[in-house]
């Protein structure tokens, strides 16, 4: 697939790579994932770009690396050396072995509560996008990202 930049000026040292596309359920639309560098990103974010025959809006997709084994942030399960903690119920097994259906707890909020004497609601999964600990990590990671 070719990118042609309708509304944006992109120089030869900008970098854009089309990763993959996936259809959005029964809407006839597609989401296309693009990898880029900070400088290019700043130029394109929220702008219309041409992608093949289509015009689309370029949006940020910021993700925090969350370990599927121990629920900690910043590393993957492949490099995890911690004991398993369940993302669903905070039990001592990983998410793949979980049989819990009703008792949902967020280990990261539980830890933070006991560490700092806080009262975050813990009745959500550790990978919940509204988890306050997840959101705090997201903000921190965004601050660290250099868009220039
Ligand atoms: Zn881990
Ligand atoms: Zn579990
Ligand atoms: Zn949480």
Image (cartoon, helix red, strand yellow):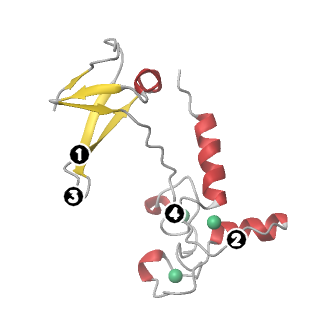
Give the mark nearest the N terminus, 4 or 2.
4
Give the mark nearest the N terminus, 1 or 4.
1
Q: Whole-percent x and y of residue 138?
A: 59, 47
Quarter of the figure with the N terminus: top left
Single out the mark in the foreground, 2 or 3.
3
Element class at badge 3: loop
Q: Quadrant of residue 16?
A: top left
C-alpha span from label 1 to label 3: 15 Å
Figure quadrant, ligand 3:
bottom right
Element class at badge 2: loop
In the shown orientation, is residue 4 left or right of residue 93?
A: left
Element class at badge 1: strand
Single out the mark in the foreground, 3 or 4.
3
Element class at badge 4: loop
Give the mark nearest the N terminus, 1 or 3.
1
Question: Disc 2 designates what residue?
Answer: 121
| Label 2 crowd bin: few (<14), some (14–19), many (20+), radius 10 Å | few
- Up the image or down, 3 lies above or below 91; here it is above
In the shown orientation, is residue 24 left or right of residue 82?
A: left
Residue 21: give its label.
1
Asked whether mark 4 and ligand 1 are closer than 8 Å, the reply comes as yes
Rendered residue at 63%/44% (across/down):
139
Q: Quadrant of residue 14?
A: top left
In the shown orientation, is residue 76 left or right of residue 15?
A: right
Q: Quadrant of residue 57?
A: top left
Question: Disc 3 designates what residue?
Answer: 26
Rendered residue at 63%/76% (across/down):
123
């Amino acid at each position: 697939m070719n990118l042609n930049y309708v509304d944006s000026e992109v120089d030869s040292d900008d970098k854009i790579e089309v990763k993959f596309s996936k259809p959005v359920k029964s809407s006839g639309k597609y989401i296309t994932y693009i990898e880029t560098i900070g400088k290019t990103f700043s130029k394109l974010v929220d702008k219309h770009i041409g992608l093949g025959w289509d015009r689309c809006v370029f949006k940020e997709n910021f993700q925090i690396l969350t370990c599927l084994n121990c629920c900690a942030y910043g590393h993957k399960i492949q490099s995890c050396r911690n004991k398993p903690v369940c993302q669903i119920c905070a039990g001592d097994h990983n998410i793949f072995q979980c049989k819990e259906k009703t008792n949902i707890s967020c280990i990261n909020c539980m830890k933070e509560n006991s560490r700092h004497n806080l009262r975050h609601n813990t009745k959500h999964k550790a990978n919940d996008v509204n988890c306050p600990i997840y959101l705090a990590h997201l903000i921190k990671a965004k601050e660290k990202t250099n868009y220039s």
